[in-house]
Image: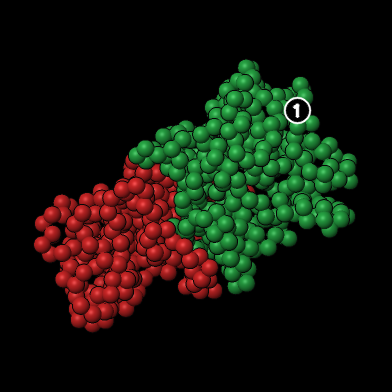
Chain colours: A red, B green
Amino acid sequence: MHESEIISIFLKHLGRGGDLPLGDDAGAVRFGDEWLVATNDMLVRETDVPDIMTPEQVGFKAVTMNVSDVAAMGARPIGFLFSIGLPKGIEVGYLDGIARGLSRGLEFYGVPVLSADTNEAADLIIDGIALGTTDRLLTRSNVKPGDLVCVTGDIGRALSGLLVWRENLNVSPRTRKVLYQKFLEPTARVLEGMALRDVANAAIDISDGLSKELHLLAEMSGVRIDVRSGALPIYEEVFEVAEALGKDPVELAISSGEEFELLFTIPPERADDVRFEFNVIGKAGVGRGVYLDGTPMPALGWNHTV
Amino acid sequence: MHESEIISIFLKHLGRGGDLPLGDDAGAVRFGDEWLVATNDMLVRETDVPDIMTPEQVGFKAVTMNVSDVAAMGARPIGFLFSIGLPKGIEVGYLDGIARGLSRGLEFYGVPVLSADTNEAADLIIDGIALGTTDRLLTRSNVKPGDLVCVTGDIGRALSGLLVWRENLNVSPRTRKVLYQKFLEPTARVLEGMALRDVANAAIDISDGLSKELHLLAEMSGVRIDVRSGALPIYEEVFEVAEALGKDPVELAISSGEEFELLFTIPPERADDVRFEFNVIGKAGVGRGVYLDGTPMPALGWNHTV
């Protein structure tokens, strides 16, 4: 069964979706004058965890992937919950590492644990849940024609790191380090998300790849998005990996998932109000579809299998 | 590894616990004048789902077990999230049943879905998360000496139903129906929990067995609890199963988990303010420990394996 088939089965039966339609980075309900934002994301060792990832990195990532969705809604994370499924005979050392990683992540983002549950399961599974609050929601469906399309940080290192590992590429220790940092220990853009709530029109975090997220923004907002490849923030090391594998570096960068950067759009006159570094990679306009240097951009993305 | 060992590994690293210490039915953070309550509970088919349970019942139970924890805190459930792990090759019909069951549960309790996530996993896993709000928290640690110890509904049918199924007992269709209703389709005491927030001193839901929950209340509140076996609300059908298996019916009833009844304590002068049916089963006093008819009550309970 394809993921889309599974999702359609659930959507068919589950009509109610809080005070915001399902389909955003997180769900939301009104809570007095504020919005309560809630999101969850399950990490399964078999499919989501490359074997060079340390248990600390696994725990840290379980926090990051959820906090990132809260950040993409412009919300401040206020709590974390997790359920953990443990296979029989898991080593104490591994479990201790996961607990250390979770703890490090929660400290890094300043979030308390509200509830935790442990179970026996066939595979190691961590289901993380993050809650947040905001007085204004950043959604995926509010891009306006004329908006500048922007991204935090850089893109492409997560997939490049995965390829270095999977293809056993012979790269310099420095290159490996730069790529593995993003591949194994990505961090969420929490402060940036909170800063954007008052200036941006829309936002989404890059979990499935820039290209897929651009398509989601364009579709859900009913706009056309034009991106210039020369404006994409791509590290030299990504070009290095692309060359070694005979791949197109831009294609590699826009397919790279689990970057946890924020893709957001702002009216041009608000660009100076953004108080952190970012790159303008394109512009939204009237119409539909996503274009790269004037040509339709395919919806390339992460397949969630390592 | 024992569950207690696993929990102690996590507690060692995870110091921060919201605005309420970890160890209650749910975690809580202050949210303006109210408390936001959050809980999660993972259901694993291999260990939690007897094979006569229909997928609809599995989906419904995933909602009930979480909503029950919110109810035990005196809170109104305001949102539900779930992550589902699906083994390769799961049948569309089974999945559709789970979705129907989740939907029925959410309608039954009047709760919207805020977020959902699907993944491939080695076993069928549903991690449910419930959020709730209340202006006053009911905890496990606030039993006062002199409080009446009370329980909603009846106890013992869940385990009796499990035994009928597991031991293939020859009981009448009526008995089977009465027991299976609680064993396969238990419901959470949401309205009762909300009604209790202003009158009860403490509450807990019966997920691991009355006896274990009584011990938790006594320990966490620093009181002694005396229970009279003759006051326990036990259906005739539970006696029938106990007799067929040569077991003590009271022991069976107090070990029965996943009842999702509320165990709560109230000052005697507030008993008339409780506007639903319940049974007074005992009394809290100065001291420690749990006693049944004057004799120490063992902490019998659910072993979470079917």
Q: Chain of mark 1?
A: B
Left-right relation of B121 to A213: right
Residue B106: x percent and y percent?
A: 54, 58
Q: Residue at x 27, y 79 (%)?
A: A289
Please state which amino acid type lies under the numbered disc 1: Arg
User: Which percent across, then down, holds residue B147?
Assistant: 61, 24
Horizontal relation, residue B62 to residue A211: left or right: right
**Residue shown at 54%/74% (left/top)?**
A1
- Along the line of sight, which residue is nearer the eye, A14 or B19? A14
Residue A131, above or below A4: above
In the rendered image, the vertical position of residue A44 relative to residue B73, given as above or below = below
Let me know if residue B109 appears in the view: yes
Tell me the quarter of the picture where residue A169 sits: bottom left
Instruction: Give the residue drawn at x 58%, y 33%.
Output: B273
Q: Is residue B248 left or right of residue B95?
A: right
Q: Quadrant of residue B44?
A: bottom right
User: Quick one: which residue is furthest to the top in this view?
Assistant: B286
x, y (%) of residue A194?
A: 25, 50
On-image quarter of the C terminus of chain A: bottom left
Res. A179 visible in picture: no
Residue closest to the eye, A278 or B130: B130
The residue pinned by badge 1 equals B228
> Element type at marker 1?
loop
Camera-nearest residue between A230 and A52: A230
Q: Residue at x 62, y 17 (%)?
A: B286
Q: Around disc 1, counting alpha carbons within 10 Å, would you say few (fewer than 14), some (14 to 19), or many (20 or more)?
A: some
Along the viewing direction, whichever of A217 and A48 lies nearer the viewer: A217
Horizontal relation, residue A15 to residue B177: left or right: left
